[in-house]
Image (cartoon, grey):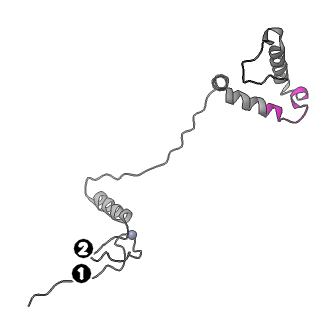
Amino acid sequence: MATTRTPRPVAACAFCAGPMPPPAGTGRPAVFCSPACRKAAHEARRTARPGAFEVKVVDRVVVESHDLPGCVEAVIASPAACRRVLAALAQLPAGTLEHDPKWRPTYTAALALVDALTAPASRVPPPRGTRRLR
Ligand SMILES: [Zn+2]
């Protein structure tokens, strides 16, 4: 009389001991609850072998600092960055640029910008589709 072996379903994941999904009905009974656990178990077995190396994923934050001239160069190369700097300066509390000694050179530079923008040479019609500064 031939007997058939019916494999019993595994109660818990062999790696995380978590609950198992319902059995598929055919094939070998699952040992791990998910492909992630199957892969993690494989990696654990692999690194346990002599001479094996362990792969660790490590997040590394790299802070690149740059000097002020490099920063200015990067801002000048970007119209969006220039626009944001000008908008941020415009948002400073009233009188800050004019009366705070720390900002006074910036105020002088802003006046030079206004002079440059309003100089007669710049009073040519702007390209179509652009707004003129007031
Ligand atoms: Zn698992």
Tell me which amino acid carries mark 2: Arg
Q: Which residue is mark 2?
A: 28
Of residues 112 and 62, the one drawn nearer to the viewer in this rendering: 112
Vertical placement of 123 versus 23: above or below? Answer: above
Q: Secondary structure at mark 2?
A: loop
Q: Quadrant of residue 65?
A: top right
- Residues at discs 2 and 1 in contact (Cβ within 8 Å): yes
Q: What residue is at 82 percent from the left and 32 percent from the top?
A: 90
Q: What residue is at 37 percent from the left and 67 percent from the top?
A: 34
Q: Is residue 132 left or right of residue 4?
A: right
Give the mark, 2 or 1, whose residue is nearer the N terminus.
1
Tell me which amino acid carries mark 1: Pro
Cβ at disc 2 under 8 Å from ligand 1: no
Q: Quadrant of residue 28?
A: bottom left
Q: Give percent across and percent down for residue 19.
A: 41, 76
Q: Which residue is mark 1?
A: 7
Alpha carbon separation for disc pair 2 and 1: 8 Å
Q: Give percent across and percent down for residue 95.
A: 91, 31
Of residues 22 and 40, the one drawn nearer to the viewer in this rendering: 22
Q: What residue is at 31 percent from the left and 75 percent from the top?
A: 24
- Magenta stretch? 88-99
Q: Is residue 105 left or right of residue 44?
A: right
Residue furthest bottom in the image: 1
Regarding ligand 1, which quadrant of the image does it lie in?
Answer: bottom left
Q: Which mark is residue 24?
A: none
Q: Is residue 101 left or right of residue 33?
A: right
